[in-house]
Image (cartoon, rainbow, N blue to C red):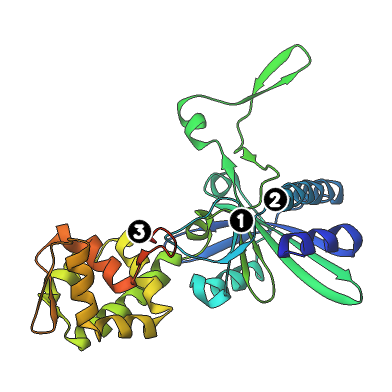
Amino acid sequence: MGKVNTILEELTSGDIRSTQMLFIKRTRSCYVTYSPNMNQDLRTSLLDLIKINLADKAENLDGEMIYNPCKNLQGKISLCSHEYVGSYDELMESLNSPLEELNTEDAGKLSFYCFICDVEYNGLHKKYYFFRRLLNYRALQKRGFLGISIGNRYEKIDNAVLGIDSVIDLICTESEVIVLSHSSVEKVFRLSEALSKKADKVLAHLKDSNKIENYDGFYRDCQTITVKKRLANLSENQALLDEVIQNMGAVEQVITTRRLGIEVSDGKIVYEGKNQLIELLRILQDVFYISEITRREGVDD
């Protein structure tokens, strides 16, 4: 049974001990959490919506994979550790000390909500955190207005409006983060900062290896988040990276076979400019392959 099915079974058949609804504003420097009053009926309705969404996900799932910031396979959910996302502890600390009052101005700046569910299943206590980006209407409220129809009257809504649907982006358990919406990881957590740190470690390792001629130019061209995501993946398998840079004969053969237009001189890859960056990253990731049956050449990006 997959993780989504397991959670759905526990929510459906287990004993729901408590639920809590929190709204979170993410700023550049911190998280601010609010815990406004929400009646039990509304929280029960939201839990029902979550179960519907999980059931739909479970029906269409095609397996699980380790989270890869560069790759999102249709039909698969991704898994990663708390440490991987970079700001898990910071977010949990904010969730554990929420502010009770949520004024109209702050409501318009909220980023996402977290629905917390304590459940007991087969004698075991579980705690799940369900995250979803909020549907807000700031753009419409700036250039127009929202209203409500009451009988034969249509009245303007002056307060901030927050939309909540049945979709779930992330689930945090006691041991991992379950990613249902790939792009949401960067919206909820400070993943870009975490990936940048991982990428910097890889770049420092490459500098120490002295295997790239014109390393300074290569370093400058690697400062975009897209490139840093690829480098961060290398940090998860440094043994593979070491095997690549220590085998310049094989590197040179790949360059020649695939006509990559990169030179190897005196045991070093000669980096000449940004037009070579993607191919050099592919070399370092060792993603060139030949299929077993048809001997077809390909790239596993």
Residue at left offset 88%, top offset 70%: 121
Image position of 217 with respect to 297: above or below? below
Disc 1 is placed on an element classified as loop
- The residue that label 3 is drawn on is 298
Q: Position of residue 208 (x, y in %)?
A: 21, 88
Residue occupying the far top of the picture: 152
Q: Earlier in the sequence, mark 3 or mark 1?
A: 1
Horizontal relation, residue 235 to residue 255: left or right: right
Name the amino acid type tagged 1.
Answer: Leu
Q: Earlier in the sequence, mark 3 or mark 2?
A: 2
Disc 3 is placed on an element classified as strand
Mark 2 touches mark 1? (CB < 8 Å): yes
- The residue that label 2 is drawn on is 57
Towards the viewer: 4 or 110: 4
Disc 2 is placed on an element classified as helix
Image position of 30 with respect to 239: above or below? above
Measured Cα–Cα span from mark 2 to mark 1? 8 Å
Q: Earlier in the sequence, mark 2 or mark 1?
A: 2
Image position of 171 with respect to 232: above or below? above
Q: Nearer the viewer, mark 3 or mark 1?
A: 3
